């Protein structure tokens, strides 16, 4: 009985402490106005709010299609030009013209047509897909650089593989379309495609085109143009090396006396 009485006394003492604590806390609660109570209720109901804004967004289907159609059209056009004119002039291969001049001359001849092709593609895209005419000058610059870079790449393929280079070009186009995220978002493709994507010429052209159409910073456009220029330079140097080696091998074979 005594223990029960002691326990009841402790419970009563604890209840008194809780009651005094509640009274002390209640005295510290500020008196809220009706609007403040409403605002407090809203905060409790939605404690976290977030808003999202998209910068440099593609404004419509026309721009989305343009970012892919323009580079692909230039790639196919460059393949057709090299198929038509050849990687180098066969007539000059056996002459004393320097290899650099020989390859460069063929590239310049094709580049003249590539420039006209780039102008035509940009005008058609701007007129039919709802692209702003204000974006025409930088878009034309991207098309010109991309067209010449693609031409140099196809010249290299033709120099190395001959007529099979055109077939390889089509295969590379399919690979690049997947790797650039043109068919599926790049995050959904397999890891190898994600790895090679930043280093492909078509990726550089698509990124530069997208930057122009979305009004991104000039740095994004410049990065794409620089990548395309490096591709053009690399392809030209390798083409010169391949043609020079082929001319040397041909000359040595021709100079070898026939066995009797």
Image (cartoon, rainbow, N blue to C red):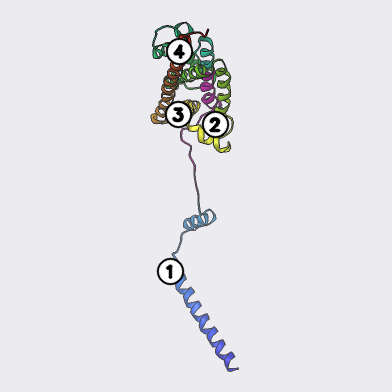
Tag 3 and tag 1, C-beta contact below 8 Å: no
Mark 4 nearby-residue class (10 Å; few <14, some 14–19, many ≥20): few
SS category of the residue bearing label 3? helix
Tag 3 and tag 2, C-beta contact below 8 Å: no
The CA span between labels 3 and 2 is 18 Å
Mark 3 against mark 4, which lies toward the viewer?
4
Q: Which contiguous range is marked in magenta? A: 49-76
SS category of the residue bearing label 4? helix
Name the foreground residue: 110 vs 116.
110
Mark 2 nearby-residue class (10 Å; few <14, some 14–19, many ≥20): many
Residue 103 magenta-highlighted: no
Specify the label residue 252 is tagged with: 4
Mark 4 against mark 1, which lies toward the viewer?
4
Name the foreground residue: 39 vs 91.
91
For marks 3 and 2, the one nearer the N-term is: 2
Residue 75 magenta-highlighted: yes
Residue under label 2: 179
Residue under label 1: 28
For marks 4 and 1, the one nearer the N-term is: 1
**Residue at 56% in and 17% down:** 166
SS category of the residue bearing label 1? helix
Mark 1 against mark 2, which lies toward the viewer?
2
Specify the label residue 211 is tagged with: 3
């Amino acid at each position: 009985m005594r223990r029960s009485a002691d326990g009841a006394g402790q419970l009563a003492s604890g209840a008194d402490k809780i009651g005094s604590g509640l009274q002390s806390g209640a005295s510290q609660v500020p008196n809220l106005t009706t609007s403040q109570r409403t605002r407090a209720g809203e905060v409790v109901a939605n404690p976290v709010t977030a808003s999202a804004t998209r910068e440099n967004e593609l404004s419509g289907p026309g721009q989305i299609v343009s970012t892919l159609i323009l580079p692909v059209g230039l790639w196919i056009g460059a393949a057709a030009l090299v198929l038509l004119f050849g990687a180098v002039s066969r007539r000059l291969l056996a002459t004393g013209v320097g290899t650099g001049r020989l390859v460069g001359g063929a590239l310049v001849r094709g580049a003249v047509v590539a420039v006209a092709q780039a102008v035509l593609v940009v005008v058609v895209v701007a007129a039919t897909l709802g692209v702003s005419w204000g974006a025409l000058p930088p878009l034309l610059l991207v098309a010109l650089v991309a067209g010449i870079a693609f031409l140099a790449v196809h010249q290299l393929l033709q120099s190395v593989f001959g007529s099979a280079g055109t077939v390889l070009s089509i295969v590379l186009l399919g690979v690049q379309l997947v790797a650039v995220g043109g068919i599926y978002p790049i995050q959904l493709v397999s890891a190898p495609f994600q790895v090679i994507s930043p280093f492909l010429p078509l990726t550089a052209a698509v990124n530069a085109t997208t930057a122009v159409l979305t009004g991104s910073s000039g740095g994004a456009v410049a990065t794409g143009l620089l990548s395309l220029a490096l591709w053009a330079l690399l392809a030209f140097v390798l083409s010169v090396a391949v043609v020079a080696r082929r001319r040397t091998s041909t000359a040595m074979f021709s100079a070898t006396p026939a066995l009797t």
